[in-house]
Amino acid sequence: MTTTQQILPPLTEAQVCDYHANGFLVLEDAFARQELTTLRQETVAICRGQRGALQGAVGDHHDQSDDEVLRQYLCIHFPHKVSPVMLDALKHPNIANALSQVISPDVKCMQSMLFIKAAGKPGQAWHQDEYYIPTRDRSLTGAWIAMDDATVQNGCLWVIPGSHKHGILWPQHSHDDRRFDCAGEAGGYPYTDEDAIPVEVKAGSVVVFNGYLLHRSLPNTAAAGYRRALVNHYMSAQSLLPWHPPQEGQSIATHDCRDIVIVAGNDPYAYKGLQDMAQPHVRPDGKGGCRDFSKDKQGLKNQKTES
């Protein structure tokens, strides 16, 4: 993907201030047209299983068209583990440079998610990413790469500007709203849907947003087509990542998930080495119904998602 990259100028002071005030910013034209074409082609290859096994994959797609294959998937977690193209996108300099200004000069990534979201597919209810991926310094940041034009009609992101400032993780509960997938819904916050704004962006744009920002997406109600997006999660590499429970004998104070990719600066904890823990897998879209999370206290925690 390096041959067609166009490097954006550094963020202005006003952009950095807007990010901290509103909890999000948009990097327009962060990915060039040829990069988007490559990402879309790679999405098909991943869904077809041509890049490696996916837990929960639908099955053999040998006799199906690309469109038939794509429509069977809503989200694939950790595509960067099977696809060098997705790994390169995760480390894209336009993302790394922006994060270096709004998070820290040292940045690491712990997760990628590939959303296909064909026409008719659901969105995700209001949530905060830090509820699922806790960071000790509250530096979790999402980078939402638009592979198609994202509109209100096809299910773009909606955000509540400034909602990250409370620094509170609002409680989550299960729901039966079939506009959304099976992930939990945040509640108890001092906002209404009228406080939200749509983040409509052109293909190639990247929406960068704070891990405490309340956001959601609605279903893709377009007659046809997709709202494809690659969503990666990052944080300051200067902080520990207590994502998974510590193993026996490990200190809670120093517990640190090392299934990461360094994308900017240095890794102060390089002496700990790296791990390969998470496996690429398919996320259920809820079409066949959702489990009763009330009977499983870890249910919501185990459904890390992003709109």
Image (tube, helix red, strand yellow):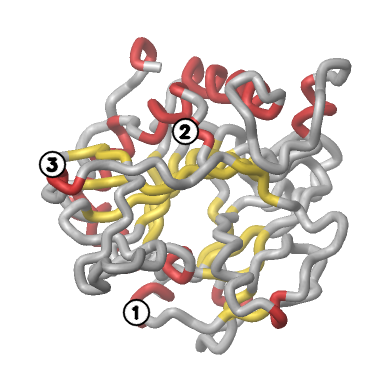
The mark total stands at 3
Q: Nearer the viewer, residue 204 or 231?
A: 231
Q: Earlier in the sequence, mark 1 or mark 3?
A: 1
* Residue type at tag 2: His
Q: CA distance from mark 3 to mark 2?
A: 21 Å
Residue 154 in the image, given as x and y percentages of width and height: 72, 46
Q: Residue 157 vs residue 231: left or right?
A: right
Q: Nearer the viewer, residue 53 or 26?
A: 53
* Residue in the picture at 76% in, 75% down: 292
Q: Is residue 167 above or below residue 50?
A: below
Q: Is residue 164 above or below residue 42?
A: below
Dot 1 lies on which element? loop
Disc nearest the viewer among 1 and 2: 2
What label sits on residue 167 in the rendered view?
A: 1
What label sits on residue 80 in the rendered view?
A: 2
Residue 240 in the image, given as x and y percentages of width and height: 23, 61
Residue 156 in the image, given as x and y percentages of width and height: 62, 51
Residue 125 in the image, given as x and y percentages of width and height: 65, 67
Q: Residue 179 vs residue 95: left or right?
A: right
Q: CA distance from mark 1 to mark 2?
A: 30 Å
* Residue type at tag 1: Gly
Q: Residues within 10 Å of mark 1 (few under 14, many from 20)?
A: few
Residue sitting at the far front: 249
Query: What residue is disc 3 on?
Result: 266
What label sits on residue 183 in the rendered view?
A: none
Dot 3 lies on which element? loop
